[in-house]
Image (spheres, rainbow, N blue to C red):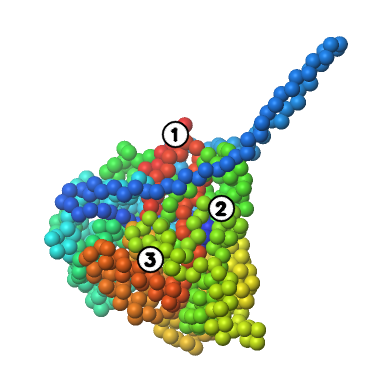
Amino acid sequence: MDSALAACGEPAVILQGVEVTMTHPVRRWLFLSLLILAGAGLLAGCSSRPSQAVEKTIERTVVVTVPVVETRVVVETRSVPQTVVVTATPTPTPAYVSRINVPPDTLTYPIASEPSALTPQGAIDDTSALIAQQLYEGLFNLRADGSTIPAGAIGFKASDDGKVYTVTLRAEAKWSDGKPVTAQHFVDGICRALEPATGNSYYYLLTDIARITGAKAFASGNTADCKKVGVKAVDDRTLQFSLEQPASFFPKLLSMQIFFPTRVDITRTVTGGLVNNGPYTLAESVPGERLALRANPAYWNAGQVGPKRIEFKVVPELADQFAQYKQGDLMVAEFPSENTAQVSSDPNFAKELRVLVRPGVSYLGLNTQVGPTKNVALRKAIASAIDRKKLVEEVLKQRWHVPAQSVVPPDIPGSQAKDPSIGFPYDPEAAKKFLAEAGYGPDKPVPPVDLWINREGNNESLFRAVADMLEKAGIPVRLNTSKWPVYRGALEACGGKLKRADAAQASAECDYGLYRMGWVMDYADPSALLDIVFSPKSAFQYTGWQSKKYEELLAQALAEKNEAKRLELYKAAEKVLLNEEVAIVPLQYYDRTLLVKDGVTLDYPLFGAPNLQYWKRGN
């Protein structure tokens, strides 16, 4: 929802540390390492029948070379007495033996923290988004093979002018209390997500990206009547969206949680259990320990649900996650970078290692309003002083990660990942020149720059290495660490002050020069990063930067009907962000690096949280 700035998005929150993805422009902070999650939809094609378009998910196959030890047996025979001497160099027994201490109908899955909410409209972090994905069902679901399949909806069609989308809902869908799911429930869900009191940052997706008619006025509080928003129930089975302007990417959004339904007539049953329409219902909650779900018998596709019980175990630390996985108590896990050699060299671990594409990027944000980083030449020096390849290969020691010099990842339309002119490569000599351009030298050293990070996952080791690189370039760094909730709160408070140019408060409270963050994309379009996360208007960036040129390019791209021209506009905007203004410095593209027990068939979509109903367990 993370995220997930990844934790969604969550915002879901790194390089292999924690990013909280907070879904939307909002919660895609990504707890990348601790939460195995992400963000939402990709739906292709416009048709009166259910979309049949398929986009293939790219899975990187990790080839792990395991040393082979030759075994030789030498037999020597002597006459009297007869003695047999055996000399051998045995193949070592793997230290890890895979086991599962879980009933056959159960899936155990780690989460970094307790969910902040159990409804999709209230999900503001990756954990909440992951669990909401199992409890509720939206219009369409994403699968690991890249396809988008009907869920609460069975199809959609677009008007000739591209401004009206009509969605046909599934007749047999029911809530867990047996009542039918209707189009009005989807309208109510969207209205609740747009209400300012809800605090769902994904509202931006509907107001400024998709530009649903009247959505911005309602979300800003200028009108209190959601009936003026361009989403309506034509009848119980027909949902209609009206847009201010054509948006060819709109179908890509329809699997996202911001389109999930809600019941305004009831939020909980008398026994305290949620009323929901997804494949699972809440079975048990033990604060700080676990949260369990059981298959929902009222779900329209209940017979095809894979695991009948899901146990989410609260395991904040990667080392503990890894230990519980080895013991057989977790069936999915990530692992600390210091265990990479162990995982890679042990054939049983290597067999369970999965590296999947997860479109997103981790990055450093630079404070453009307060302190020495106000100077754009210093920001260019910082960008040139960071050796991203070294961070991946020597600090994380996970060579399958891909260093990033651009924002939009490979395999996404409009990506400039292979263009050497985007951003700033590692170049110590260029860093020195930029420092001189900024006015610094032997007689005027750079004042200390504060780097704020959250301390979960591998963040401390990773960003100590970043600090060392900057120190070597002549840029002293002070590392400031805090836990994710404190970190996120401080950045959110500072984001508003910097945008308002509230210099007095910002100087006193927002004195960071750099901060770490990451974002997992919600759908396959540059707007999922360049608009939602890095626009000066975004709720998810805390640099304080302003750029009329950038905003004009974004506006032109959103209105452009020609796809090739639209992507060129986004490329130009990305160069403003990275080359001209240097508001952020990309570090690494995200992937999902997981250990998954042998016999477990996982189904991870490119975007959003996984639908665990599609997972299977073998023998």
- Residue at image mark 2: 398
Q: Which badge, 3 or 2, comes first in the chain's sequence? A: 2
> From the viewer's perspective, is 423 left or right of 319?
left
Observer-nearest of 67 and 242: 67
Q: Give the crowd class for mark 1: few <14, some 14-19, many >=20 residues within 10 Å.
A: few
Identify residue type, mark 2: Gln
Residue 229 falls in image quadrant: bottom left
- Residue at image mark 3: 529
| Label 3 – label 1 distance at C-alpha | 38 Å
Q: Which badge, 3 or 1, comes first in the chain's sequence? A: 3
Relative image position of residue 497 (x, y in whole percent): 44, 82
- Residue 378 visible, this angle: yes
Identify residue type, mark 1: Gly
Observer-nearest of 533 and 240: 533
Observer-nearest of 92 and 36: 92
Q: Are marks 3 and 1 in contact (CB under 8 Å)?
A: no
